[in-house]
Amino acid sequence: MVQPISVFKGLEGVYVTESALSLIDSENGVLYYAGYDVKELVERSSFEEVVFLMLHQRLPTSSEFTEFLKLLRRSQELEPIHIETIRKYAGVTDILSLLAMLIVLEGRGKIGGNSNDFNAAVNAVAKMGSFFSTIIRVRYGGDYIPPRRDLSFPENLLYMMNGEVPSREHADVLDDLLILHAEHGIPASTFASLVAASTLSDLYSSIAAGILALKGPLHGGASEASYAQALSIGSVEKVPEWVQLTLSEKKKIMGFGHRVYKIYDPRATIVKNIIARFMGSMNSEVKKVYEITRALEEYGEKYLASRGIYPNVDLWTPILYRMIGLPADSFTALFAVSRTAGWVAHILEYWRENKLIRPLHLYVGERPRKYIPLELRTGS
Ligand SMILES: CC(C)(COP(=O)(O)OP(=O)(O)OC[C@H]1O[C@@H](n2cnc3c(N)ncnc32)[C@H](O)[C@@H]1OP(=O)(O)O)[C@@H](O)C(=O)NCCC(=O)NCCS
């Protein structure tokens, strides 16, 4: 007897590979990177250390970390080809598209498939940070500022963007956000980068595939969409009616829901705890978005929690992004900078036992039929 064929729309519930990089404990609401609770990493570690952790699945010794930092910081410097490209396109295209263009440029002449190419992986993370800062700086009328080797990755990111060494608070918040977004299993963007890498395309082009899949509001674009949503609602008083109307029209509330978590996203809890530390220093715009988001969470949960739809990290991150001075159209691009750590780690891991990714589709169209010349077709 012929077995019916199952189609797994959106690959929901399908395991596509093995990985030692992260564990999403969606029952208990805990996220682990290579065995470490991400909450503890946010409290005690740094993004730079997490990049090492992703690439080696263990924390570095102090001498290893010193060498690693030298490589990372050296790789943050941009070349004339990058700077010229940024000057040419920063005002023309969105930040994410330009990031993809620049990282593809970085892969010129390179070949894929080397699972030990740690230097390229570190270079990709470093360059993405500098691309991000320089694009924003140039967009606002400035020019490339070389990174400083005495500054950490998040410090350099803000320094190259603003031309000033950031406060400890801002650099720490950015560091926390970078850690929180560094890795999360195989969402659409990581899968896209693995699909590209599985063809033995080069590392940088595979990252570009990830960047472009991150862009949409169902994935990485959700934080920008969630921020725009809060601004368009306009006030706390309008939230209950807005939630009811949105749900009655079968539209989605941005910053709610997740394919894997059917409980509160643990990363959102971490972000909320960070926000709580800065309540006193929010400007009026951020404070307003905060109040609206709080009301949105309350009313959204009232209607959606019974269906396993809870706030996700992207509901709350815009508040921190704005608090440290990032433009409202740069949130997804910052996510891409951070997630590059996860993408490159997944790609190198996958290349150890590479297998071309090539799923099937179940054909539901016409069975073979006869071609009728144009002049003989009747239209029925
Ligand atoms: C992330 C997301 C795509 C995951 O969803 P998924 O597993 O693919 O599930 P679906 O989109 O098919 O949604 C399943 C049901 O829940 C509803 N739902 C899911 N997320 C919702 C949301 N944010 N607001 C309202 N309803 C939602 C859908 O409308 C659908 O309802 P239906 O069964 O009546 O048609 C989805 O929750 C979403 O679009 N969220 C908003 C965007 C967002 O915040 N993305 C960032 C994720 S970190």
Image (cartoon, rainbow, N blue to C red):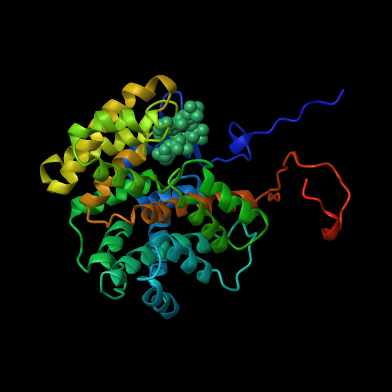
Which is nearer the eye, 86 or 28?
86
Residue at (62%, 56%) from the top-left corner?
Answer: 197
Which is nearer the eye, 245 or 80?
245
Which is nearer the eye, 117 or 287?
287
Residue at (36%, 76%) from the top-left corner?
Answer: 87
- Residue at the extreme top: 306
Residue at (71%, 48%) from the top-left corner?
Answer: 358
Residue 313 vertical placement versus 262 (above, below): below
Which is nearer the eye, 198 or 243?
243
Give percent across and percent down for residue 26: 46, 28
* Residue 44 visible within the image: no
- Residue at the extreme front: 378
* Residue 254 visible within the image: yes
Which quadrant is home to the N terminus? top right
Give percent across and percent down for residue 84: 40, 79
Give percent across and percent down for residue 91: 35, 71
